[in-house]
Amino acid sequence: MELQEPIQVTLPCADGTDPECVGEMTHGLPLVGLTDEQIAAVLDGEGDAWIGLTPEQVEINQENLSPSEKKSPPEDGLIMVQIALDTTCCFCGSDQ
C-alpha cells in the first residue's frame, strides 16, 4: 500500500474574541485519498464537514479513523465521518 501525504487546505480563521480579526490558516487534512468533491465539502464547510468514505478509502485511512468510525454502519455503501478542523487563530493578540 502506497503512503500518501495529507492534502493541505487553507481556510479562513478568526481569533475567537475579536470578530474583526480574521486571517487564514493552512491545515493538513486528517485523511488521505479524498476525492475533489470530498475536499470541496471540507472547504465549503470552512473545515467542518461530514463526508462519506468508500470501503477503499476506509482501508487506506485505518490509522486515522476511530474504532467507532470504522464500525459505523454504511449509508449507501459509504462510511460517514466528520472532519472538524480548528479554525481559531490568534493574529491580533490580546494586548491590543
Image: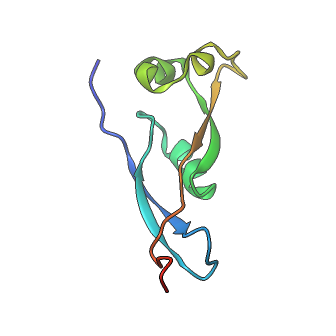
Specify the farthest residue to the front: 95
Q: Is residue 29 shown left or right of residue 68?
A: left
The type of colouring in the image is: rainbow
Question: Image height check: is 22 above or below 36?
Answer: below
Q: Residue at x 62, y 18 (%)?
A: 68
- The quadrant in which residue 77 appears is top right
- In the foreground, 24 or 54: 24
Question: Image height check: is 87 above or below 17?
Answer: above
Residue 10 x/y as whole percent: 44, 61
Question: Image height check: is 57 above or below 49?
Answer: above
- In the foreground, 92 or 68: 92
- In the foreground, 69 or 35: 69
Residue 81 x/y as whole percent: 62, 31
Number of numbered discs: 0
Residue 4 x/y as whole percent: 30, 33
Residue 21 x/y as whole percent: 55, 79
Where the N terminus falls, by quadrant?
top left
Specify the farthest residue to the left: 2
Q: Residue at x 27, y 23 (%)?
A: 2
Q: Residue at x 54, y 61 (%)?
A: 88
Q: Residue at x 43, y 63 (%)?
A: 25
